[in-house]
Amino acid sequence: MDSGRISDHGFLADGRSAVLVDRAGSVNWWCPARFDSPAVFGRLLDDDAGHWSIQPDEDFTTERAYLDDTLVLRTVFTTRHGSVAVTDALALEPGARGHQIGLRSPRILARVVQGLSGEVPMRVHYRPRFEFGMVTPYLVDRDGALEASAGGDDLTLHSSVPLQCDGGEASASFTVRAGSTQRFTAAYTPTYDGGRPHRPDADELIANAVEGWRSWAGLHDYRGQYPEQVRRSAMVVQGLTYQPSGAVVAAATTSVPEKLGGDRNYDYRFVWVRDFSLTVRALWHAACLDEANRQFSWASRAMGQIGDEPAPIMYSVEGERDLTEHQLDHLNGYADSKPVFVGNDAWRQRQPDIFGEVLDAAWLMRYYLDPMAPEVRQRLRTLADQAVTAWHRPDAGMWEARDAERHYLSSKVQCWTALDRAVKFGSRIGDEADVSRWATARDEVREAVLTRGWNDRVGAYTGAFESDHLDASVLIMPLVGIVDGGDQRMRSTMTVLEQRLSHNGLLRRWDGDPAGFVICSFWLVGCLALAGEEDRASRLFEQLAGRANDLGLFTEQIDQVTGEPLGNFPQAFSHIGLINAAGNLTDVAEQRRAGAQERRQLVPPGMGRMEGKR
């Protein structure tokens, strides 16, 4: 049995790591130490890389849903003999509530099987494999628990059902009757930390996880358009947050391909500075102000002191910079799509768009940065100074090209963003000469973008200076404000992109991109809204939102013809795109209702009156 389609999986999280469990009740992914650590269940990437399944031992159908306002998953299996429910949760620290959830999670996966009707034969199959399937642990029965141990890892399984061991795996058959319950927990501990888990109570762990997630959800009062989708996406982004640092990983997985059988398989279990501004804005839109503030604090700390060297574009969840990529040759890959990578060599690239991402986020958070710490002032000033010169040079671009550097338009646009926000900060980050120099460079960048980025023959802004090739990344232009939403050239660009790169509401990044890229499609929603086409923007938003799986989860890409979700999962970029698109629609509607002539500036609740006092 293989792991099935990526979109068949549900997503569990505990603020340190993530579990993916499929419709058939199989846990196919868990890197328990932290998001970017080795997997103990990795069947997502190879059938022999470990899994833990609990499912009926006969034909079944499934229905599943998250318990309201949680990442606790309930799957109902129905057979010809009856029905059972399996409830799965990653445990949170007992009593942790609100913004404290995930800080000290115990790294325990709890699973409870409850009989709903009739009598259903069930089977559990437990097959841990450490280090992405390279290590088969010993299974030892110790004090009524099954301990899997090898190298530096221990995984302790407590089961209310007696298990039979066979080598490196264990299994059992049992019957669940209406009203009966069986309980299972798997607890991870590093071998040499000196501790062993006590016997966990699965019911208590699940109840605590439910209360913990609901306490977090209750702190966030989003009142904009599409509240159900925004709240679910905000919870996914929270689930992808490594709570000890506040960093949001791009996705929970590595090497799920952009194209089946292709080789663009990358490790996304890291934190990109590019995602940072969009994440902060998404958390802001979703009324997650504390999380937005933590994001900024994390990025500021991770960057450290910046000199003349290019600023790093990505980090691990705790801020490490060296993310050197290597291949796991022993794995066949998702759907036999090799290679499988751990690490990501994009960390070596030069991507000047990050200057705009950081300064835009800082501008959004400016009220929380007052008074501004000296190290933050120095960092923002240095990034603005780097943007003055960096925009003249080619780079790897937003999509992290690994062939050649080019003068990507989106990179120039974000250098403009950096300089524009630096000028707005003014004396808070620089002296009069600095601000004058930034303003001059800002205007030079804009002139170059509008002249060298525009192609009369194509009728659109293209992906790079003096290029004929379309690239959906140019849709950020009205979103960051370098052009107005109603700009005629921008409207022409949107039309050409839709004609040549879009199908079934899914927009590819470029000609030759294997599938529609979800966040680009949501950028188009924002652009349409800013251009005054609110009805069409809303229709496209609803079409895209309907592309999520049954649990509201997105991958990175979606095949334009078959609708097959592709890429790492769940994808923060896609959920961030949804939140910001809903925010754009909300902002435009509020602006229209208010009769405003200019796009409303986002400020913290209750601080709008402070705008004129800075």
Image (tube, rainbow, N blue to C red):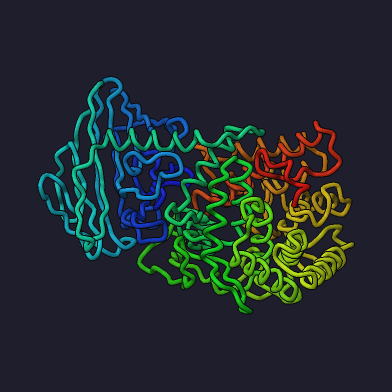
Relative to residue 96, is residue 51 depicted above or below?
below
Depth check, front residue: 93 or 147: 93
Q: Residue at x 63, y 73 (%)?
A: 350
Q: Quadrant of residue 332?
A: bottom left
In this rendering, position of residue 206 left or right of residue 438: left
In this rendering, position of residue 145 left or right of residue 445: left
Q: Is residue 268 visible?
A: yes
Q: Is residue 516 visible?
A: no
Q: Residue at x 38, y 34 (%)?
A: 210
Relative to residue 64, is residue 436 depicted above or below?
below
Q: Residue at x 70, y 46 (%)?
A: 503
Depth check, front residue: 612 or 295: 612
Depth check, front residue: 254 or 186: 186
Can you give x and y, in whole percent of width and height, for residue 382 in the image? 66, 72
Can you give x and y, in whole percent of width and height, for residue 256 in the image? 48, 56
Q: Residue at x 44, y 32 (%)?
A: 65
Can you give x and y, in whole percent of width and height, for residue 494 in the image? 79, 50
Q: Number of labelled discs?
A: 0
